[in-house]
């Protein structure tokens, strides 16, 4: 059975080479960022690993460490371009194994649109990966509307993924890895809320947003969001339907680390909205992702096929 | 069928009926936009209109929604952890005396939980001992953090030790909109509450488990309000973190999901599917009726709602509505 992974990251070789040579790279100094052993693998080593896992296609996204939204966009745009060019080359060299997911400088929406356009329309990328917020600004901010309109028009997928460690949990307690194990899931629910309560999904009904980590706590928290929408007028300013009615407007990867959580996700958002995503090569990834999905007793074979490849084939046309 | 509600707030009469111009522990009363507030410096504590009800009026409401017993917790405007410890201790004593008086005058309708000055752990321990041993209260309600210190901090070890020894139930409930989501709730869609309360509760579960509190005090009785928030749904990722990150294993001895059935939860989920998921994850003996009276984010008809749920058996409904709380609190 085919399998297409929407959530698979890249530490760019161009960055690794600069660090090994002791060169500064778009403002990043040697030693500033560590490189794990698996992160430095070449495309060929990566394909070997994909083969061992039974994964056919990686939709390759540059790691979230390279967002750098807080830095000067004139420095970061060339960085992102270099990353995207490297991903593009991977898709040229191995068109059956890699698809491209862009990284774009969200601190400047015009430049972000330009780079998204270059990647999608000229290089065949499927969309872009973005953080849950841009320097504290959430995606309901009118500043981002031109990007959503552009993405909608291009049919680009916006893959939402936090920047490592910098989630809302960190300020409450920085210990025990909770900023990731809880924080990623909190941030994703807040992003769902920003798109929904902010009216973005109404303004852009064909916008394709995929929420990583199973959308975090989104589907589980929809009941209380609905209650808030019912009793608080400020929650109804932009939307005339309850938040839960928007659950099936988004896509979600299957990275839940829990069969009952995945089952609930499917039952809540619909099987056509859940797609295969592993978080390769992070330690918080699913170790044997294809086997994991295939081994789930509470899913039908049709549901497994939908998750592993059919939904992404339909969504991305690949 | 009996029903006992663990999540029902109240304010002491001295605060809710504070005459204009008088002060109460440094607060004055002020009307703003048609609402009554207790005001002290920058602090604004909204006094819900229901707090002006007499005990008999409250009981009439309880009868109207078929709730037999409110386990009374003061509203979170009484936390005041940011105020000096002696002020907090004074407020707590007055709250606890008031709640105790109601439980004595209406023992069939009210049980009580204490308010504690958590900014001064020794004072909090002393007040918890007084509340449980002298006033007959069942435990205490505390916030998810004390001036941004979570409850796994070593400062709170004496508190947990006392709570365990006293058999006190510790009920976790955020202070107002002061949740981790607040920084991104810039437009006021109430997600500081709708997502924030649930986020804060899972962080509390995480800190108690990973911080080793539940290992160190195995007989501790903790109840997480709002269905424990996202706790049970997020347990799989907590387990993964525990497996792959050494910093997650330093203090907590076991896989996080194995602690799900060591704490209690109320049923305030606003979703049948979520409550069903919770029962299947944490066990039916761990879930209490909790309505969040008198707030708009509460359950309008708490007993009616539980009784209407088609995916729960009659035994499960009875466990939630009263049997679990009868067993755990002896009410």
Image (tube, coloured by chain):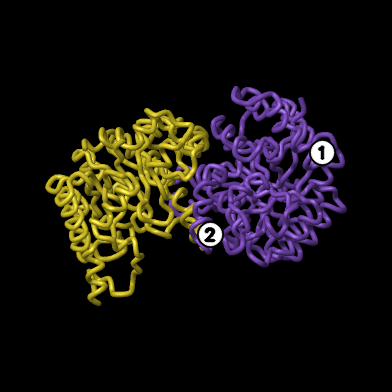
Chain colours: A yellow, B purple
Residue at numbered disc 1: B331
From the viewer's perspective, is residue B38 above or below residue B319? below
Residue A12 place in picture, x, y as percent: 25, 61
Q: Do the residues at discs 1 and 2 belong to one chain?
A: no
In depth, the one of A176 and B301 nearer the eye is A176
Residue A214 place in picture, x, y as percent: 42, 42
SS of the residue at dot 2?
Answer: loop
Is residue B75 in view from this perspective? yes
Mark 1 crowdedness (10 Å alpha carbons): few <14, some 14-19, many ≥20: some
Relative horizontal placement of residue B175, taking residue A287 as reference (left or right): right
**Which chain is indicated by disc 2?**
A
Looking at the image, which residue is at 63% across and 44% down? B225
State how far apart marks 1 and 2 are (Cα): 35 Å
Residue A162 place in picture, x, y as percent: 38, 54
- The image's mark for residue B245 is none
Looking at the image, which residue is at 74% across and 64% down? B158
Residue B200 place in picture, x, y as percent: 56, 51
Looking at the image, which residue is at 43% across and 50% down? A187
Q: Quadrant of residue B93?
A: bottom right
Q: Quadrant of the N terminus of chain B?
A: top right
From the viewer's perspective, is residue A260 above or below residue B100? above
Looking at the image, which residue is at 28% across and 57% down? A10
Q: Quadrant of residue B70?
A: top right
**Which chain is indicated by disc 1?**
B
SS of the residue at dot 1?
Answer: loop
- The image's mark for residue A172 is 2
In depth, the one of A147 and B272 nearer the eye is B272
Mark 2 crowdedness (10 Å alpha carbons): few <14, some 14-19, many ≥20: many
Q: Quadrant of the C terminus of chain B?
A: top right
């Amino acid at each position: 059975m085919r399998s297409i992974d929407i959530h698979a990251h890249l530490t760019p070789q161009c960055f690794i080479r600069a660090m090994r040579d002791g060169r500064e790279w778009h403002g990043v100094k040697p030693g500033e960022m560590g490189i794990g052993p698996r992160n430095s693998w070449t495309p060929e080593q990566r394909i070997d690993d994909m083969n061992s896992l039974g994964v056919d296609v990686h939709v390759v996204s540059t790691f979230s460490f390279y967002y750098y939204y807080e830095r000067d966009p004139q420095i970061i745009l060339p960085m992102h371009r270099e990353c995207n060019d490297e991903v593009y080359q991977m898709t040229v060299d191995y068109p059956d194994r890699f698809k491209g997911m862009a990284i774009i400088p969200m601190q400047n929406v015009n430049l972000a649109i330009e780079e998204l356009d270059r990647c999608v329309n000229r290089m065949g990328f499927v969309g872009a990966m973005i953080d849950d917020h841009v320097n504290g600004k959430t995606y309901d901010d009118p500043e981002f509307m031109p990007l959503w309109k552009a993405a909608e028009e291009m049919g680009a997928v916006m893959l939402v993924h936090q920047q490592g460690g910098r989630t809302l949990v960190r300020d409450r307690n920085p210990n025990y890895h909770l900023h990731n194990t809880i924080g990623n899931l909190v941030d994703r629910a807040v992003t769902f809320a920003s798109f929904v309560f902010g009216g973005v999904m109404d303004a852009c009904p064909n916008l394709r947003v995929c929420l990583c980590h199973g959308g975090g706590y989104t589907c589980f928290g929809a009941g209380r969001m609905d209650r808030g929408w019912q009793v608080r007028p400020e929650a109804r300013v932009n939307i005339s339907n309850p938040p839960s009615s928007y659950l099936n407007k988004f896509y979600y990867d299957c990275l839940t680390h829990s069969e009952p959580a995945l089952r609930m996700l499917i039952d809540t958002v619909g099987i056509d909205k859940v797609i295969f995503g592993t978080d390769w090569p992070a330690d918080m990834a699913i170790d044997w992702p294809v086997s994991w999905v295939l081994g789930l007793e509470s899913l039908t074979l049709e549901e497994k096929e939908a998750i592993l490849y059919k939904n992404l084939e339909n969504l991305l046309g690949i | 069928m009996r029903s006992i509600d663990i999540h029902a707030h109240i304010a002491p009469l001295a605060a809710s009926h504070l005459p204009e111009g008088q002060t109460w522990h440094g607060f004055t009363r002020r009307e703003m936009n048609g609402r009554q507030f207790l005001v002290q410096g920058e602090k604004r504590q909204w006094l819900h209109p229901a707090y002006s009800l007499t005990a008999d009026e409250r009981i009439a409401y309880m009868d109207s929604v078929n709730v037999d017993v409110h386990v009374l917790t003061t509203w979170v405007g009484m936390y005041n952890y940011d105020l000096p410890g002696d002020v907090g201790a004074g407020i707590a004593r007055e709250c606890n005396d008031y709640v105790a008086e109601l439980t004595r005058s209406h023992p069939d309708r009210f049980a009580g939980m204490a308010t504690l000055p958590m900014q001064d752990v020794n004072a909090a321990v002393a007040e918890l001992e007084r509340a449980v041993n002298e006033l007959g209260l069942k435990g205490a309600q505390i916030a998810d953090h004390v001036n941004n210190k979570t409850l796994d901090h070593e400062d709170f070890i004496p508190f947990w030790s006392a709570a365990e020894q006293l058999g006190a139930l510790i009920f976790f409930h955020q202070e107002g909109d002061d949740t981790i989501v607040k920084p991104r709730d810039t437009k006021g869609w109430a997600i500081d509450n709708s997502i924030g309360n649930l986020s804060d509760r899972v962080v509390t579960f995480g800190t108690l488990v990973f911080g080793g509190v539940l290992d160190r005090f195995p007989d501790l009785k903790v109840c997480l309000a709002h269905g424990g928030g996202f706790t049970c749904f997020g347990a799989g990722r907590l387990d993964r973190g525990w497996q792959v990150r050494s910093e997650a294993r330093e203090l907590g001895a076991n896989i996080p999901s194995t602690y799900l059935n060591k704490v209690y939860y109320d049923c305030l989920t606003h979703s049948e599917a979520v409550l069903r998921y919770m029962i299947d994850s944490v066990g039916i003996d761990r879930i209490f009726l909790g309505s969040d009276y008198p707030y708009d984010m509460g359950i309008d008809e708490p007993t009616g709602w539980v009784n209407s749920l088609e995916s729960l058996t009659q035994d499960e409904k009875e466990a939630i509505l009263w049997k679990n709380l009868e067993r755990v609190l002896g009410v």
